[in-house]
């Protein structure tokens, strides 16, 4: 609530720092408002431009939230989803940040059997089937993507299916949704991400993104979003460590 | 010129929320096709009085109903079913009932993500702000029927007031012009042009001498032209002074039509109140739009379970399983039938087992961007300026000022200080702090009411609906390009497919799947349609 300096209403303004709605929830460790966008199991929702968070290690989430708070991420005029994220990140206390990180690491996503429409009814939904040719195309893309990955990404991000490289602030990108991957690469290429001089890692990504053509991006996104790295295998992978903040020499922290 | 007013972005090429005339042709064809395929319930939505819905009589009848979302459409379903003896549980994620139907008054919480606020208006019955729905057109009989049945007091809502202003940069030296002058001048100059064209039209269309004579008289009246068929100003534009005990002195007419087409006002706002749902006369509930929500809540036997977030929906041939979480923890609920008005673009963020095509259709939906600013003014200065209700228009992002239809001559008043329609303007406005949004609103108001607007401002608030917790949009649309617009195409086929219940057990409702997006009437229409379908397919045959 905002008040004119010369207000004449004679009423008391609401306290500036009063916790209402989402801030009140955050303060009691309820991170529902994060899940409204990122999905109830942090599985992501393209419909609101929100990526899955389940595949991200704690140090990466912490680091990026700091970026949104400090303004080296999400403040570019063209970064519309980034604007929302910055506004929310700025309301998060360090307790809330640690709390949500814990929750992301803990969350268990149930598996459901798809609803099968029986008989004639089922035909009313357009049935989409992968063609053989389509499958082969995809396999080829995955192969090519793997080559590009090894050449251009591996050094910083580490092997696909791993945990990324904290020292380089490079998250694991195996399993990343294709739409999100492409969106971020476009942002880097256009300087919508990695725009701030203090964000050295982001700037590195800008130069990488600018050298990747559309074909390579397509191959990479197909390779990275391949179900092999996807959330289905999540539980078979080694459990992520929850690292504590503050042990980093990173100037951004 | 600001792009959103340019002729290229006329309503035909760009679908404006709340502004379109119904585009019947295409959807009528799709409707025919869709009903043949059985996608659409074959009953059309009916007003509640004629809603045919029977009680669950036999032992195999569905009885347990879950409604997801306490938006208006969800409440309508809950009310109608409870009245007939069904066991209805309404699950609502927010701590507040009503969804987009939100009236802010002293103490109200505005749970916009990133900008939570508590309303600090003075505590007076007329000092409220309808953050979401504010107008009820006379044609919205579904809404009005419930108002009548529940005896919700209504009063006139003034949507169209020619005494309000038009103001834009580079037009009329940036000075505000009364809308009545703009309207009178455009009609005058267009009538002049039409008269010049009359000679030509005689060659093309056989007009008798008498026809020609009548047409000339008609054109003369239309523009209030003089005997020489020239426009030289008119009383219609109002007087600068006089007109009671002294002779009235007319406003000077604008320089010509070229001046008038130099403001975006003429391209769309001029015709705003002639669009399908914006026609006068309109109504509003006395005391705030949420009186409608209150009336439903008061009539529900089982209270809405607020603060309860649905997390999972599993539809099976014999029922629907709902997973939910609230302060007490997580729980499961088994229902025979589920109705959901939660926004389509949020549904894929749940865990559900919907068929892949259905998931894809939901995946095409995006939250519609729409924002408002509300301002408490210490004095009703606009009344001294002959303005009672209605809308002034600007070419800025914040677009409009609404003068309240309630509290006339009372103490203080709440203005709508901004109502942002344009997609990108909504992105810009949402990215501002509430303080900054209000600053912009005050700048706009100061250009229209110089010297008084800022002076009388006391407190304000703002809602960007595309950031509102648990909604992230004014409903859901099907944009062609989500980066360029959120409302997008009419999407008749998509809406019909989504309205077809999954396994006959899960119904999607809300104005989002109607052809009246952004209106409560659309929400109620889909609720009634779903209930009729439920009656015909589940209730009629059960024993
Ligand atoms: C700015 C604005 C102006 C408008 N102007 C008008 C007007 O002048 N006249 C008019 O008639 N209409 C107007 N409308 C439209 C009107 O608000 C809607 O048509 C009406 O409120 C009906 O909404 P609904 O039934 O679709 O539900 P909504 O109001 O959209 O409610 C959906 C509900 O689902 C809940 N929900 C979401 N996720 C979950 C979950 N996981 N679990 C449980 N619950 C969940 C939400 O919290 C919310 O309460 C306007 C809307 C806006 C935003």
Image (cartoon, coloured by chain):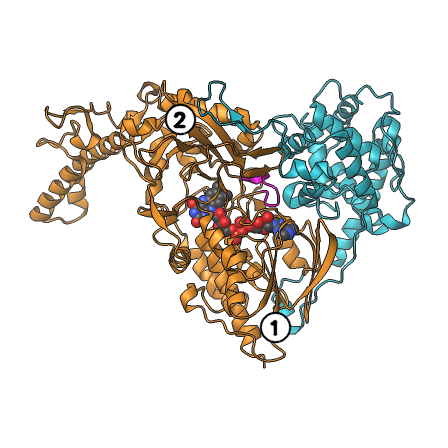
Chain colours: A cyan, B orange
Q: Position of residue B480 (x, y in %)?
A: 55, 45
Q: The residue marked by circle 2 belongs to what chain?
A: B
What residue do we see at 32% from left, 28% from top? B382
Q: Is residue B166 left or right of residue B526?
A: left
- On the same chain, marks 1 and 2? The answer is yes
What residue do we see at 67% from left, 37% from top? A24
Q: Is residue B212 left or right of residue B79?
A: left
Q: Is residue B65 left or right of residue B241?
A: right
Q: Disc 1 to disc 2, how far (Cα)?
A: 55 Å
Q: Does the numbered disc 2 mark a residue whose Cβ is under 8 Å from ligand 1?
A: no
The residue most toward the bottom is B543
Q: Which residue is mark 1?
A: B62
Q: Which mark is residue B378?
A: 2
Q: The residue marked by circle 1 belongs to what chain?
A: B
The local crowd at label 2, few if under 14, some if 14 to 19, many if 20 or more residues have their Cα within 10 Å, is: many
Give the camera-side residue of B525 and B229: B525
Q: Position of residue B33 (x, y in %)?
A: 49, 65
Q: Position of residue B509 (x, y in %)?
A: 54, 57
Q: Is residue A250 above or below residue B230?
A: above
Give the camera-side residue of B265 and B139: B139
In contact (CB < 8 Å): disc 1 and disc 2: no
Residue numbers of the magenta segment: B465-472
Helix, strand or loop: magenta stretch:
loop
Q: Is residue B319 above or below residue B165?
A: below
The quarter in which the C terminus of chain A is drawn is top right
Whether residue B18 appears in this view of the structure is no
Q: Does the numbered disc 1 mark a residue whose Cβ is under 8 Å from ligand 1?
A: no
In which quadrant of the rendered view does residue A15 lie? top right
- Mark 1 or 2, closer to the camera: 2
């Amino acid at each position: 609530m905002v008040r004119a300096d010369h207000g004449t209403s004679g009423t008391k303004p609401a306290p500036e720092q009063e916790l209402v709605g989402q801030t009140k929830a955050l303060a009691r460790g309820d991170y529902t408002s994060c899940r409204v966008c990122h999905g109830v199991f942090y599985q992501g929702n393209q419909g609101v431009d929100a990526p899955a968070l389940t595949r991200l290690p704690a140090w990466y989430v912490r680091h990026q939230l700091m970026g949104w708070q400090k303004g080296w991420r999400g403040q570019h005029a063209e970064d519309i989803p980034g604007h929302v994220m910055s506004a929310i990140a700025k309301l998060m206390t360090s307790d809330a940040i640690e709390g949500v990180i814990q929750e992301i690491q803990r969350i268990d996503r149930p598996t459901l059997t798809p609803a099968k429409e029986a008989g004639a009814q089922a035909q009313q939904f357009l049935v989409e089937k992968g063609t053989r040719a389509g499958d082969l195309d995809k396999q080829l893309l995955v192969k090519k993507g793997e080559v590009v990955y090894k050449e251009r990404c591996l050094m910083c991000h580490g092997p696909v299916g791993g945990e990324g490289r904290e020292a380089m602030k490079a998250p694991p990108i195996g399993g990343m949704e294709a739409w999100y991957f492409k969106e971020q690469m476009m942002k880097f290429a256009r300087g919508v991400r990695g725009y701030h001089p203090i964000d050295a890692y982001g700037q590195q990504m800008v130069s990488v993104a600018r050298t990747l053509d559309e074909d390579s991006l397509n191959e990479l996104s197909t390779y990275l979003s391949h179900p092999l790295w996807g959330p289905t295998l999540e539980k078979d992978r080694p459990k992520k460590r929850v690292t504590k903040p503050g042990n980093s020499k990173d100037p951004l922290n | 010129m600001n792009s959103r007013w340019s002729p290229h972005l006329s309503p035909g090429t760009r679908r404006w929320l709340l502004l379109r005339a119904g585009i019947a042709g295409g959807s009528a064809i799709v409707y025919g096709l869709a009903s043949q395929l059985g996608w659409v319930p074959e009953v059309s939505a009916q007003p509640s009085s004629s809603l045919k819905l029977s009680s669950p009589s036999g032992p195999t009848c569905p009885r347990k109903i879950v409604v997801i979302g306490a938006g208006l459409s969800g409440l309508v379903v809950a009310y109608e079913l409870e009245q007939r003896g069904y066991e209805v549980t309404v699950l609502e994620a927010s701590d507040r009932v009503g969804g987009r139907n939100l009236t802010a008054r002293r103490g109200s919480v505005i749970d916009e993500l990133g900008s939570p606020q508590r309303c600090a208006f003075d505590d007076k019955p007329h000092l409220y702000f309808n953050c979401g729905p504010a107008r009820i057109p006379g044609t919205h009989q579904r809404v009005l029927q419930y108002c009548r049945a529940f005896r919700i007091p209504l009063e006139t809502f003034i949507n169209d007031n020619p005494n309000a202003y038009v103001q834009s940069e580079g037009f009329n030296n940036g000075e505000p012009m009364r809308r009545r002058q703009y309207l009178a001048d455009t009609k005058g100059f267009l009538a002049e042009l039409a008269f010049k064209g009359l000679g030509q039209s005689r060659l093309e269309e056989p007009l008798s001498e008498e026809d020609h004579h009548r047409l000339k008289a008609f054109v003369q009246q239309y523009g209030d032209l003089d005997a020489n068929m020239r426009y030289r100003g008119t009383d219609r534009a109002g007087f600068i002074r006089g007109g009671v005990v002294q002779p009235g002195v007319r406003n000077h007419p604008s320089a010509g039509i070229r001046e008038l087409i130099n403001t975006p006002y003429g391209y769309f706002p001029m015709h705003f109140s002639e669009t399908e749902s914006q026609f006068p006369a309109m109504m509003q509930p006395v005391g705030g739009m949420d009186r409608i929500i209150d009336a439903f809540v008061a009539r529900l036997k089982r209270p809405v379970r607020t603060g309860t977030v649905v997390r999972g929906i599993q539809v099976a041939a014999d029922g629907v399983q709902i997973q939910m979480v609230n302060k007490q923890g997580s729980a499961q609920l088994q229902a025979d039938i589920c109705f959901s008005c939660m926004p389509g673009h949020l549904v894929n963020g749940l865990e559900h087992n919907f068929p892949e095509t259905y998931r894809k259709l939901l995946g095409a939906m995006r939250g519609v961007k729409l924002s408002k600013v509300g301002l408490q003014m210490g004095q009703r200065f606009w009344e001294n300026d002959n303005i009672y209700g209605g809308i002034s228009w600007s070419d800025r992002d914040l677009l409009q000022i609404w003068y309240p239809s309630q509290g006339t001559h009372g103490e203080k008043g709440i203005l709508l200080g901004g109502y942002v329609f344009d997609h990108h303007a909504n992105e810009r406005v949402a990215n501002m702090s509430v303080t900054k949004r209000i600053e912009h609103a005050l700048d706009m108001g100061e250009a229209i009411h110089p010297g008084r607007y800022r002076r009388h401002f006391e407190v304000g608030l703002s809602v960007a609906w595309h950031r509102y917790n648990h909604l992230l949009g004014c409903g859901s649309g099907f944009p062609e390009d989500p980066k360029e617009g959120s409302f997008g195409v009419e999407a008749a086929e998509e809406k019909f497919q989504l309205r077809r219940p999954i396994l006959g057990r899960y119904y999607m409702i809300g104005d989002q799947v109607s052809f009246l997006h952004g209106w409560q009437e659309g929400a109620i229409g889909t609720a009634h349609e779903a209930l009729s379908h439920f009656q015909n397919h589940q209730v009629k045959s059960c024993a």
